[in-house]
Image (cartoon, grey):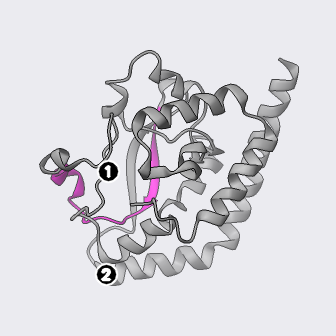
Amino acid sequence: MERHNLYLFVKRLSDIVLSSLGLVLLSPVFLLVSLLIKLDDPKGKVIFSQTRVGENGKEFVMFKFRSMVPDAEHLLEKLLDRNDTDGLMFKIREDPRITRIGRFIRKTSVDELPQLFNVLKGDMSLVGPRPPIPREVSAYSAYEWQRLLVRPGCTGPWQVGGRSSLGFDQMVELDLYYIHHRNFSTDMKLIAKTIFLLFGSKNAY
């Protein structure tokens, strides 16, 4: 227990230090992406916020750069039958809701960078399971709900292990394995893999 508590302390300290450093170093990227989104759609918002489910089922607001048209959430119902993955997630390769700049920032995962603010706030960690939306969680089994036993992350085993090419059941298995075996070394390895995959993942859409 003492060793686990030490790990959690170091993990949170690392989250604060690295997310703060990331926000400072990547500020030019934030500015550039914000400008491109505004140029592409002057009336739309730069930041997209969405309710997600975090540790122990607690809901929070997650931030991303907006990569879709403003009314994307309302158009979702018309696209559910085109889902390209299985289980409770929704992903389609040629999503008509994605904007021109949105395709680029999603392909490079730059749209995820505002989640560094969520890490700094403590809603998320740099490494952990992908935070689901309430609609997905409402259909979780007791086994799948175990994904919510820890703080969700910006990256994790699903993101570096195949991302959108993996189905929901595979994601759950990867997440639960991580939860039961996580340590500081594993977290650093996942962060390093994420940096290498950041520009050019073929499985992000």
Q: Quadrant of the C terminus?
A: bottom left
Seen at 47% across and 25% down, the residue is: 57
Seen at 41% across and 81% down, the residue is: 36
Q: Which residues are magenta?
A: 59-76
What residue is shown with label 1?
A: 91
Check if residue 199 falls in the magenta segment: no
Residue situated furthest bottom in the rendering:
39
What residue is shown with label 2?
A: 40
* Spot occupied by residue 102 in the image (x, y as percentages of width and height): 36, 71
Q: Nearer the viewer, residue 5 or 204?
A: 204
- Please, is residue 21 above or below residue 182 in the view? below
Q: Which mark is residue 197?
A: none
Give the residue type at disc 1.
Lys
Seen at 45% across and 70% down, the residue is: 105
Give the residue type at disc 2.
Asp
Q: Nearer the viewer, residue 46 or 138?
A: 138
Instruction: Determine the secondary structure under disc 1.
Output: loop
